[in-house]
């Protein structure tokens, strides 16, 4: 197998996944559990085998695929661990944002409740006196 890092920077992973051809290659590799060559992957695509090879190398540097020599050809296979780590990072990020938004909502609701309480207290602070009448009113 290749010497790609076990854990790539999440930015490298998302940069690799930003290209639609690389995402398509990753999906195509999912249909080949034992791996596939760049030549086999290039057949249904509107790009050259060399372009496919370059895209596969980007995916490999990101830790998303691994390469291994099988006779005269090099086969590429998905490295699921890196996809799982990236998905876990996104889930953790989403959880942190949910917590932040929950705290913000609670703070806004608390401020709103506090404002209502102050307004109600101000009405009671008049001691129940009759409302002031405009000048000249009977």
Image (spheres, rainbow, N blue to C red):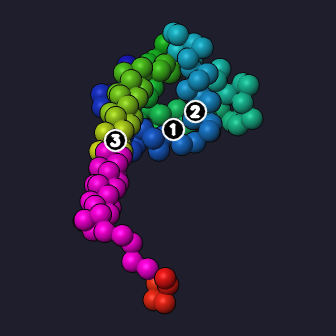
Find disc 2 in the rendering and name its residue: 23
- Most foreground residue, 126 or 74: 126
- Most foreground residue, 84 or 102: 102
Work out how far the residue at label 1 is from the one at label 2, CA to CA, in angstroms.
6 Å
Which of the numbered marks, if any, corresponds to residue 60?
none
Place of residue 103 in the rendered image (x, y in percent of width and height, measured from the top left): 29, 45
- Asked which secondary structure carries label 2, the reply is helix
The quadrant holding residue 19 is top right
The quadrant holding residue 120 is bottom left
Kindly report the secondary structure that dominates the magenta region of the rendered protein.
Answer: helix
Place of residue 58 in the rendered image (x, y in percent of width and height, measured from the top left): 48, 38
- The range drawn in magenta is 105-133
- State which quarter of the image contains the N terminus: top left
Q: Residues within 10 Å of mark 3 (few under 14, many from 20)?
A: few
Q: Is residue 5 visible?
A: no
Q: Residue at x 56, y 20 (%)?
A: 29
Q: Residue at x 62, y 30 (%)?
A: 24
Find disc 1 in the rendering and name its residue: 17
Say whether residue 127 is magenta: yes
- Asked which secondary structure carries label 3, the reply is helix
Which of the numbered marks, if any, corresponds to residue 102?
3
Q: Residue at x 31, y 68 (%)?
A: 129
């Amino acid at each position: 197998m290749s010497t790609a890092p076990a854990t790539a920077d999440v930015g490298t992973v998302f940069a690799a996944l930003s290209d639609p051809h690389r995402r398509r290659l990753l999906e195509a590799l999912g249909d080949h559990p034992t791996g596939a060559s760049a030549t086999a992957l290039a057949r249904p695509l509107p790009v050259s085998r060399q372009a496919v090879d370059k895209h596969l190398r980007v995916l490999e540097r990101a830790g998303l695929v691994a390469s291994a020599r099988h006779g005269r050809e090099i086969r590429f296979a998905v490295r699921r661990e890196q996809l799982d780590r990236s998905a876990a990072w996104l889930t953790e990020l989403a959880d942190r944002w949910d917590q932040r938004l929950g705290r913000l909502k609670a703070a806004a609701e608390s401020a709103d409740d506090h404002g209502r309480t102050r307004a109600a207290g101000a009405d009671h602070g008049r001691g129940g006196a009759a409302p002031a009448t405009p000048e000249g009113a009977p």
